[in-house]
Image (tube, grey):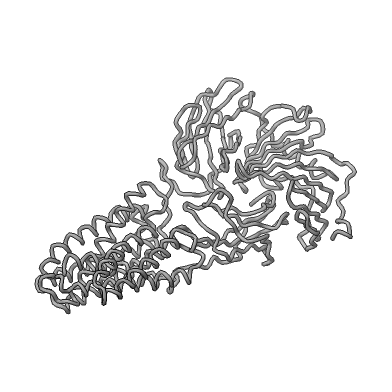
Amino acid sequence: MLATPPGDVRLLFDDDVRPAGGAAAVDAKGRSVLAGPERRLAGNPRAIVVPLRSGLARGAYTVRWRVVSDDGHLISGVLAFAVGAGSPKPIPTLSAGGGVAASSVVLRLVFLAGVLLAGGGALAGRVLLEPGRRRVETATVGVGLALVAGGAFGLRAIEPVADATRFGRVLEVAAIVALVGLAAALASIRARRLALVSTLLGLLELAAPTLAGHALDPRRFRALIALADFAHVLGAAFWIAGIALLAVTGSVRARSRFAPLALGAVALLGLASIPRAIAALDSFGDLVHTGYGRAILVKTGIVAVALAVAAANRTRLRRLGLGAELTLLAGVVAAVAVLTELRPPAPAPASAARVVRARPAPPPADAVVLAAQDDDVAVGLAASPRGGRIAVRVTALGPDGLGLNGFRVRIAGSQASACGPGCYAANVPLPAPPRRVDVALSGGGRRPATLVFTLPARWPPPSASKLVARVGRVYRSLRTLVIHERLASSRRNVVVTTYRVEAPDRLAYRIVRGPQAVIIGGVRWDRLPGGKWQRSQTEPLDEPEPFWGTDPVRNARLLGTGRIGGRPVRIASFFDPRLPAWFELFVDPASSRLLALHMTAQAHFMRHRYSRFDAPLHVVPPPAGKR
């Protein structure tokens, strides 16, 4: 739930992505609130922005997104959010779609079979076949190259959004190489020297699965995993193509050479599988609980049966036995085609306690709560009295509203321990006034940062529950006011807006260098910079309403006093468990009017100043001539 309407939805991924089209954003009645096509965030190839219509009314919304990753996977999903404090939990009204496409699996099968046949035929043919049988090698390589070209062009045809990805670029190069090699293989019928060209180009195709697939996804030891993946392809290509050549030629000399070499290829295949599986799977449970893991089990089972058949065949390499072995290996290639279509399960975040991503727990009831911003991460601090010491709990809240695990956190110089999703705790001495508590965060794939929190001078501080309730009542009783807002989702993304509010249901706002809107009852007008006003229907507002709404307030404590714009204020803080969000209020002690507000929530760092209380201002429709 969001207290204020967002201008867009931003999605962060662990790999480079591109928009795949098909994004949608609707309200609870199915009406579109999409303001334009999804796009990549400038300067961040791993972030996608879904723009929303400005000034969304209170209520539930659903956003569907579709992207293609750098390894060629089409990924889609939905998320639901609600605007307005105290809104009920939103329920998605759109479906993500997706799933494994049969056409894509078939074309990936054709492509992989071609790579293994072309590369393996070139490799095994040179080792196993006598010079007089090299035309069989060239024919095998040529058939493989034809399959590579057909599979690559087919995949690019059904997945055009992948053209600009690493997957798409590798497919393009592999198809061109295959066409050149196929032409050389056909021309070698007249010019036999060209057979060597097709053989060399067939060998080059062996690099395509590694360059296009999961092996080069961003992760630790990527070079080692890519090397293991290439070795895996090499072993499989020699084994499969070798069996195919033996089945076609029946060469006695090739049979005698193949057995020890095949044993080495199978050993290479097995050894290379270990780092690949460790990289792809985070735990043994992923083998049975994910589609990717189950595909690995199927592939492993077929390989085991193929090895048993191979062992039986090695005493007398009969063509019938070789055919059975080749059929089983074709099943292995099919399983690999499914694997390349599936995305490996996302790794669990690393942390000392191995906790899962989830919403953090609320702070202890006796704690004072404070919050700060670290780029796009909300960092909350809860400090509970423990005599001459304090029990401190730090919460790291990610842009998705879930706790961020895997940080190394030091609180006032003491190493904190994990205490739940995004939670880090330590027991430290109560600092002397001015009671500064330094929180140092490092690891988690982010640059190190140190945040400074200042606890109240009066310790333990008194409750501010009555003050917060009184401020809410005074705010709702206002006839008019102006809100000056600075809203950031990260260090680089800041929006400045001015709101004019008139009771009971009128509001107008203008975003600096952005859109503006006027809302009166159930009618609203929107205008983009330089554009015309557009009229639409909306849910009536209930204004003025404080941003924490009627949500239950926890941990309300009086922090002390200060000054805002030269005026004395009382400062209080509290925690809203529904958003979740940390609030800090700056209150005029004489009138209980709210002069300023700081709110820290998921990718939502808001600063308000309030003015012109009950001043004569009127929110009216735009001039008729400009509508």
Task: State the residue at coordinates (19%, 77%).
Answer: 248
Number of numbered discs visible in the structure rendering: 0
Residue 353: percent from left, percent from top = 41, 42
| Residue 415 as seen in the image, left or right of residue 121 | right
Vertical position of residue 552 compared to residue 436: above or below: below
| Residue 412 as seen in the image, left or right of residue 372 | left
| Residue 114 as seen in the image, left or right of residue 26 | left
Residue sitting at the far front: 191
Quadrant housing residue 600: top right
Q: Nearer the viewer, residue 207 or 503?
A: 207
Vertical position of residue 469 compared to residue 103: above or below: above
Quadrant housing residue 30: bottom right
Vertical position of residue 493 compared to residue 18: above or below: above
Task: State the residue at coordinates (48%, 68%).
Answer: 159
Q: Nearer the viewer, residue 128 or 354?
A: 128
Could one spot residue 359 in this view of the protein? yes
Q: Nearer the viewer, residue 179 or 481?
A: 179
Task: State the residue at coordinates (57%, 29%).
Answer: 452
